């Protein structure tokens, strides 16, 4: 009976985590074009990371900072947001190097930032890792997103 209860709790928490990630993924879709969405992503992921210490939320926070770099007018502020995002993204991957979601976020970021910023050193590594590993995830939405992004 205890095992069944534990299994049920695990399943429910996994479903809630997956549902929660859908909200963050939706903000990723709009954050690049909407400063309001980028700020919402930053606020929500900051709170989520403080409460859970899950590296994936640090990755979402990093992307929010990258988005704010696009929205900022002041060049110094742009660089500040970019450097914060870069540091947060690397810390997220340092904490959980096998996280597919964070690897995908880093790949997309590195492929989209100007080469002059010098943040493109992990593109081939992340592409290879995602290509080899995406089939093993139980998160169907993430699997589809990775497959579509990598054109597999």
Image (tube, rainbow, N blue to C red):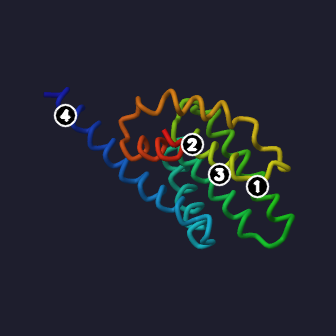
- 20 to the left or right of 120: left
Q: Nearer the viewer, residue 103 or 61?
A: 103
Is residue 18 placed above or below 32 in the rendered structure? above
Q: CA distance from mark 1 to mark 4?
A: 45 Å
> Residue 29: x and y, percent?
52, 61
State the image coordinates of residue 9 (x, y, percent, origin top left): 26, 39
Q: Secondary structure at mark 3?
A: helix
Q: Is residue 136 above or below residue 19?
A: above
Residue in the picture at 60% in, 72% down: 34
Examine the image and state in which quarter residue 68 appears: bottom right
- Give the residue at x 50% y 49%: 51
Where is mark 2, residue-wise?
A: 104
Q: Is residue 83 above or below residue 70?
A: above
Question: Element at badge 2?
Answer: helix
- Marks 1/3: CA distance? 9 Å
Give residue 44's mark: none
Q: Residues within 10 Å of mark 2 (few under 14, many from 20)?
A: many
Q: In the orientation shown, which residue stands out farthest toward the front?
A: 151
**Residue indicated by mark 3:** 62
Q: Sequence order check: which comes first, mark 1 or mark 2?
A: 1
Cα–Cα gap, marks 1 and 2: 18 Å
Residue under numbered circle 1: 82
Separation (CA) of disc 4 from disc 3: 36 Å
Q: Tell me the CA gap for discs 2 and 4.
A: 34 Å
Q: Earlier in the sequence, mark 1 or mark 3?
A: 3
Q: Place residue 3 in its image quadrant.
A: top left
Residue at the (63%, 71%) spot, across then down: 35
Tag 1–tag 3 contact (CB < 8 Å): no
Residue sitting nearer the eye, 94 or 112: 112
- Residue assigned mark 4: 5
Instruction: Answer whether labels 4 and 3 touch (C-beta < 8 Å).
Output: no
Q: Residues within 10 Å of mark 1 (few under 14, many from 20)?
A: many
């Amino acid at each position: 009976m205890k095992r069944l209860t534990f299994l049920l709790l695990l399943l429910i928490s996994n479903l809630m985590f997956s549902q929660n990630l859908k909200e963050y993924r939706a903000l990723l879709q709009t954050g690049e074009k909407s400063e309001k969405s980028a700020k919402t992503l930053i606020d929500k992921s900051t709170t989520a990371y403080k409460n859970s210490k899950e590296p994936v939320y640090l990755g979402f926070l990093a992307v929010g900072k990258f988005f704010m770099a696009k929205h900022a007018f002041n060049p110094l502020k742009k660089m500040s947001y970019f450097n914060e995002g870069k540091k947060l993204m690397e810390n997220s991957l340092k904490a959980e190097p096998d996280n597919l979601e964070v690897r995908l976020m880093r790949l997309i970021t590195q492929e989209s930032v100007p080469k002059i910023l010098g943040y493109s050193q992990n593109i081939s590594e992340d592409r290879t890792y995602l290509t080899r590993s995406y089939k093993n995830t139980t998160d169907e939405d993430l699997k589809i997103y990775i497959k579509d992004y990598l054109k597999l």
